[in-house]
Amino acid sequence: MNQAQPVRRGYTAAPGPQQPFLPWLPRRRGLAEWSRCTRHAAVAAVAGLLMPLAAYCSQVTYPQVEPGYQIEFPRDEGSHPQFRTEWWYVTGWLETSQGDPLGFQITFFRTRPGADEQNPSRFAARQLLFAHIAVSDPKRGALLHKEKSARAGFGLAQAKEHVLDVRIDDWVLRKSGQTYHAAAGSDELSIELEFEPTQPPLLQGDNGYSRKGPQATSASYYYSLPQLRASGRVVIDGRAHRVRGSAWFDHEWASALMDEPARGWDWVGLNLEDGSALMASRMRDEHGQAYWAAASERAAGATQATSYAPEQIEWTPLRHWRSARTAIRYPVEWQIKVGERTLRLQPLMDDQENDSRASTGTIYWEGAVRALDENGRLVGRGYLELTGYGERMAL
């Protein structure tokens, strides 16, 4: 492990939102920035933050993601508050003591909205935090989910730097020693899990610099922890279930994640039965065509991953499902090709739509999937994420 360096080493400034006077805005990018800013303002209002829009959308400078930054542990497991967007994301497959399968998702988001950052008030919304949890239970047939949001501060909500400790009230994701702990939910639905690493971190893209489009500035710093051993309990309708299984952990931070032509993305993280790990993703344009793609694969016992170029990756939808709640049509079954490997993704259940308009303002499909080889043999399990099938994904 390299000697720790200051967290801001290697970062350069990226432009933030324009000043909020519509006649002065550049015709294309300015309007897009204004749209993003007003969406942040609406989300802030949901979080209980009332302020003038002009103050909320003031000028701010964000660091830019660039190749060459050395991700270090445990330093970079914590928050990077200078960046616009960040998330910590854990998904996986669990099995109850009765042998029933469950899928789960726990995600904490942090955003720097660019609010009046010179305001000395402790109530100034310099950082906003959101959290989602969801459980896929085939016996129910529909996704169970909860969400939470807050401004950081006052000891009630925080995302610490240099160490993984993210929390909103009693919802928490943290690391103690080598064990990761997550607890979130309510009396009706809650998740309390511990995760034990079995492999070193997997640095995505070019040593953790993960491109999201043709423009080099559309990128994130991104690492994963595949093949985590998971154990704990899940409460559904007030009834507790002891569970064990496997999980996948992602941590990303960025300031300009999507090029303007990109509408949304498809992503999958798979824990394969032979101990290897596979991640594949693509950005889609407004016509639903691939705008960019990325993938990585690491064999069991290996320390280095193989990264694939966009032309080596192919996503083909096989079956769609339409939500009765939102009327959004999602491709829930896929064939994906990564290099020489071809896999078929089949959902644990179709209805795994997450309506999070009460927090992050988005609707997306996030669900447990099985991975089958060309002979129909089960070779892995993981999670599939589908965004931008309703409105364009906004971060």
Image: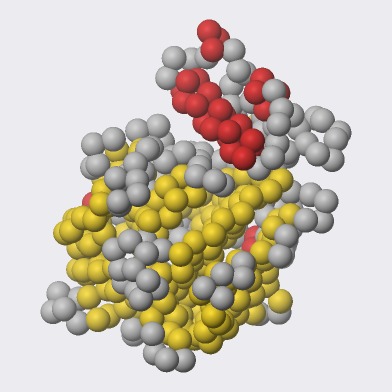
In percent of width and height, residue 18 lies at: 59, 21
Q: Give the image quarter of residue 262.
A: top left
Q: Is residue 105 above or below residue 119?
A: below
In percent of width and height, residue 41 lies at: 61, 32
Q: Is residue 71 left or right of residue 271?
A: right
Q: Give the image quarter of residue 285.
A: top left
Q: How is the image coloured?
A: secondary structure
Task: Give the quarter of the figure containing the N terminus.
Answer: bottom right
In percent of width and height, residue 261 lies at: 35, 33
Q: Is residue 322 left or right of residue 128?
A: left
Q: Is residue 135 above or below residue 193?
A: above
Query: Toward the viewer: 248 or 212?
Result: 248
Q: Is residue 252 above or below residue 297?
A: above
Which residue is at 47% across, 75% downward?
Answer: 247
Which residue is at 67% across, 27% downward?
Answer: 56
Toward the left, the furthest residue is 375
Residue 304 in view: no
Which residue is at 64% across, 35% downward?
Answer: 45
Q: Give the image quarter of residue 22.
A: top right
Query: Toward the viewer: 128 or 270?
Result: 128
Q: Is residue 180 left or right of residue 143?
A: right
In percent of width and height, residue 373 lies at: 20, 76
Q: Is residue 311 left or right of residue 132?
A: left
Report the label total. 0
Which residue is at 18% across, 58% downward?
Answer: 319
Residue 88 in view: yes
Q: Is residue 168 above or below residue 24?
A: below
